[in-house]
Amino acid sequence: MVPTPAIPKDDYALLTMDEEGARQRREERLRKLHVQTIPRLRLLGFLWSVLLVLIARRLGGETVWDASSTTYVAVTLGYCLVTEVLCRLWFRGGRDSERLPRAILTSDIGIAAYFVYITGGPASPFFFAPYVRVFDQVFYGSAWALRMLACAAGGQLFVFLLHSWVHESVWF
């Protein structure tokens, strides 16, 4: 058996962290999450939704790229850019509050509702899209997930009403 070296007593101090150090590490992890990780995942999700819009149009026999496709791409990618800049500015000021990032995560439901509308409204195969935002927010707790669920249902109601108004048909 090979003897393992004992840890010198001076090095035990490195294994524990004082309260201020723990607070700084938490703030850094939070900043990295909202400034790097979530914006990258949001961009990937929006690019995926653009691809799905084009595939749905192709399979539906519509023109794949028209003015509404261009508008959708401009709105989603513009939204992605603006929200990333807002988060960077928010955390650059030394804030550790998650109010703005949570508001942005909530506003993603509006983009998901727009995605549902552009792919066919109530008849869209992607009708569940606003609820995806609810599933990935469960780690914030059940109260937050219920608020997100209510927002997703509101987004679906908005899609119904907008589709009924534009197409002059009643779905309910």
Image (spheres, grey):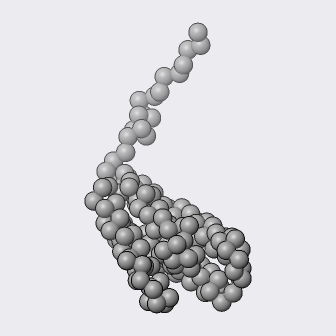
Q: In this picture, is 46 found above or below 145?
A: below
Left or right side of 140 for 46 = right
In the image, what residue occupies the spot 66% across and 89% down? 67
Q: Can residue 90 be seen?
A: no
Looking at the picture, tell me which residue is in the foreground, 45 or 12. 45
Residue 93 x/y as whole percent: 41, 75
In the image, what residue occupies the spot 69% across and 80% down? 62
Left or right side of 166 for 98 = left
Looking at the picture, tell me which residue is in the foreground, 14 or 135. 135
Count the marks: 0
Looking at the picture, tell me which residue is in the foreground, 29 or 152. 152
Image quadrant containing the N terminus = top right
Q: Can residue 125 be seen?
A: yes
In the image, what residue occupies the spot 47% across and 83% down? 163
Outermost residue on the top side: it is 1
Tell me the quarter of the picture where residue 171 sits: bottom left
Outermost residue on the left side: it is 143
Residue 10 x/y as whole percent: 42, 34
Tell me the quarter of the picture where residue 120 sits: bottom right
Tell me the quarter of the picture where residue 145 sits: bottom left
Image quadrant containing the C terminus = bottom left
Q: In this picture, is 5 found above or below 28?
A: above
In the image, what residue occupies the spot 41% across and 34% down? 12
Residue 105 x/y as whole percent: 43, 69
Residue 45 x/y as whole percent: 58, 66
